[in-house]
Image (cartoon, rainbow, N blue to C red):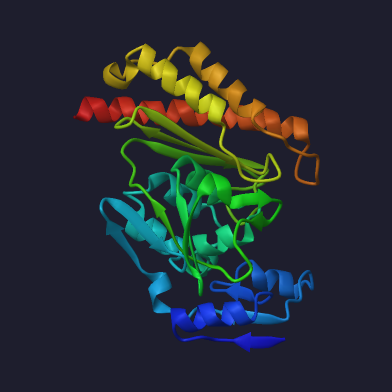
Amino acid sequence: MEFLRPATWADALAARADYPDAAPIAGGTDVMVELNFDLRRPPALLDLTRVGELAEWTVVEGVLRIGAGVTYYRLISELGARLPGLAMAARTVGSPQIRNRGTVGGNLGAASPAGDAHPSLLADDAVVEAHSVRGIRHIPITDFYTGVKRNALAPDELIAAFWVRPATGPQQFSKIGTRNAMVISVTAFALSLRPDRREVGTGFGSAAPTPRRATAAEQFLSDELTASGRWESRTELDPTVIRRFGELVAEAAAPIDDVRGTAEYRRHALSVLARRTLAWTWKDYVTEGKAA
């Protein structure tokens, strides 16, 4: 196995073009596990840890551009106030040691249906920035996941960053597993309220071949909040609205039976998570309104 360690982004893209079967590695929290258990044996490893710009984030015209090498720990400590839902998800990833090494870029590259970052990225309507020697592509997050552990990257592309708008309303993330962290989720759900645009964002994982949004649930809740004037009044939600929201989220799922849970249990759990996160998020929205 060859080991490639470029010092610049240009060199990394050139190496990717020359070795399209090489496995990119930054934190290594997924790749090294697969190597250690002999689940994967790529012809080469492409180490990106020397490419400093991948570990940078900035704000461009009000939108966050977060480098693929920014760790979960830094998402929590530096960006938690701007992306609270993604920070909540990051806190459930592995141990402190894993959070100090692991990156959202790696989570995106692995494209596992159970990846903890995916639901929040979907709820926040993120965009993936992919580079190659041919140029730059911006891939909407809803187009990025193409199958079980498959993504829309071309063989010569690398993830440079992802773009996401800072939160304009409350966000939540919740998952079910045998414990809160250091475990693959049975299912997970993220919710984002966008009162400035009168929109609702959702995302869920471990309940379909790819991470997904519950678009019918989003539209239902957005329409309900608009028609009832609750975006402005921030009055208590009708329990029937919360229940219907949970039902629509569950209907968007296509789970399977496996060692972590049955399809029936996942669908039920996802509905419960959706109802709970909506209740929590709306409570935060009401509290913010009172404070203002």
Residue 50 shows up from this direction: no
Q: Position of residue 132 (x, y in %)?
A: 52, 71
Horizontal side of 77 relative to 147 (left or right) equals left
Going 49% across and 31% down the picture, which residue do you hit? Answer: 277
Horizontal side of 46 relative to 83 (left or right) equals right
When the figure is inspected, residue 260 is found, relative to residue 108, above or below; the finding is above
Q: Position of residue 55 (x, y in %)?
A: 40, 71
Going 45% across and 43% down the picture, which residue do you hit? Answer: 125
The residue lying furthest to the left in this view is 292
Q: Nearer the viewer, residue 209 or 97?
A: 209
The image quarter containing residue 285 is top left
Q: Nearer the viewer, residue 250 or 275?
A: 250
Which quadrant holds the C terminus? top left
Q: Nearer the viewer, residue 259 or 54?
A: 54
Going 57% across and 47% down the picture, which residue do you hit? Answer: 143
Which quadrant holds the N terminus? bottom right
Q: Position of residue 201 (x, y in %)?
A: 46, 35
